[in-house]
Image (tube, grey):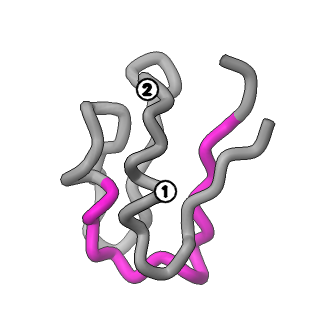
Amino acid sequence: MNGHLKIDDSRCIRCFSCVDSCEGALKIENLHEPPIWNEEECIFCFRCIDVCQNEAISFDN
């Protein structure tokens, strides 16, 4: 799939519900920063976008 998942640092509150809902493409590397997205692991289910309470995650295609 073409496109990129974007996490808006200014909107992300580091609740990591997106990571909990993800099948393995989002990882926590630093608790003070948004999760890191790994495109190769992503199945493009967009659950992360659905669960983000601050609408910090978007998909740009």
15 or 49, nearer to the observer: 49
In the depicted structure, whether residue 53 falls above or below residue 18? below
Q: Secondary structure at mark 2?
A: loop
**Residue 49, horizontal then vertical, whole percent:** 49, 56
Quadrant (top left, top right, bottom left, bottom right) of the C terminus:
top right
**Residue 51, horizontal then vertical, whole percent:** 37, 64
- Disc 2 marks which amino acid? Cys
Magenta stretch: give its range: 4-18
Query: Residue drawn 56% across and 81% down?
Result: 11
How many C-alpha atoms fall within 10 Å of the one at disc 2: few (<14), some, or many (≥20)?
some
Secondary structure predominantly adopted by residues drawn in magenta: loop
Query: Residue drawn 47% across and 76% down?
Result: 12
**Residue 53, horizontal then vertical, whole percent:** 41, 78
Q: Secondary structure at mark 1?
A: helix
User: What residue is disc 2 on?
Assistant: 42
10 or 52, nearer to the observer: 52
Q: How many marks?
A: 2
Query: Residue drawn 44% across and 59% down?
Result: 50
Q: Is 9 included in the stretch rendered in magenta? A: yes
Quadrant (top left, top right, bottom left, bottom right) of the N terminus:
top right
Residue lying at the far right in this picture: please name it: 61
The tag earlier along the polypeptide, 2 or 1, is 2
**Residue 26, horizontal then vertical, whole percent:** 35, 42
- Disc 1 marks which amino acid? Ile
Q: CA distance from mark 2 to mark 1?
A: 13 Å
For residue 49, the mark is: 1
Residue lying at the far left in this picture: please name it: 20
How many C-alpha atoms fall within 10 Å of the one at disc 1: few (<14), some, or many (≥20)?
many
User: In the visual, does 22 lie left or right of 57?
Assistant: left
